[in-house]
Image (cartoon, rainbow, N blue to C red):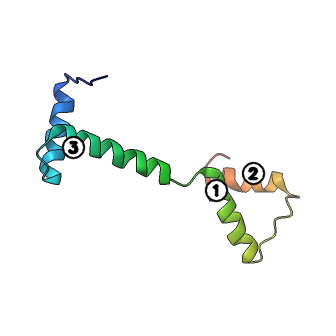
């Protein structure tokens, strides 16, 4: 199904993209911009992977959380954020 975009703001954005990239074809510019954005989203590290990586690094550094004083941890974090 063809895509017809009749929005002056989008047209301006495409023109800016063309100028920045040196491209001349609007269809190819939209294709490339969307493809690049989808690739960037696919390559983005998930929160789960990021937390796992941080936990691994902490474990490798010898950090061990007892988790026994959650109230004190919360109080400390609240204080740091100004939420006394």
Q: Position of residue 32 (x, y in %)?
A: 28, 46
**The disc label shown at residue 74, or none:** 2
Q: Position of residue 24 (x, y in %)?
A: 10, 45
Mark 1 falls on what kind of element? helix
Q: Could you tell me which residue is drawn at 82 percent across and 53 percent down?
A: 70
Q: Could you tell me which residue is drawn at 42 percent across and 50 percent down?
A: 39
The residues bearing labels 3 and 2 have C-alpha atoms spaced at a distance of 49 Å
The quadrant of the picture occupied by the N terminus is top left
Location of mark 1 (residue) = 49
**The disc label shown at residue 23, or none:** none
Asked if residue 68 lies left or right of residue 11, the reply is: right
Asked if residue 36 lies left or right of residue 5, the reply is: right
Looking at the rendering, which quadrant does residue 8 occupy? top left
Mark 3 falls on what kind of element? helix
> N-terminal of the two: label 1 or label 2?
1
Q: Could you tell me which residue is drawn at 77 percent across and 56 percent down?
A: 73
- Name the foreground residue: 69 vs 43: 43
- Seen in the picture, residue 9 relative to 57 is either above or below; the reply is above
Location of mark 3 (residue) = 29
The residues bearing labels 1 and 2 have C-alpha atoms spaced at a distance of 24 Å
Asked if residue 45 lies left or right of residue 58, the reply is: left
- Name the foreground residue: 57 vs 23: 23
Mark 2 falls on what kind of element? helix
> N-terminal of the two: label 1 or label 3?
3
- Nearer the observer: mark 1 or 3; the answer is 3
Q: Residues within 10 Å of mark 2 (few under 14, many from 20)?
A: few
The residues bearing labels 1 and 3 have C-alpha atoms spaced at a distance of 32 Å
Q: Position of residue 5 (x, y in %)?
A: 22, 24
Q: Position of residue 63 (x, y in %)?
A: 77, 72
């Amino acid at each position: 199904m063809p895509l017809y975009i009749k929005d002056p703001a989008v047209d301006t954005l495409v023109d800016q993209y063309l100028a920045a990239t040196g491209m001349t074809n609007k269809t190819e510019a939209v294709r490339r911009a969307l493809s690049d954005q989808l690739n960037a989203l696919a390559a983005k590290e998930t929160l789960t992977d990021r937390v796992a990586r941080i936990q691994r690094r902490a474990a490798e550094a010898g950090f061990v959380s007892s988790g026994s004083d959650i109230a004190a941890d919360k109080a400390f974090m609240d204080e740091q954020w100004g939420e006394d």
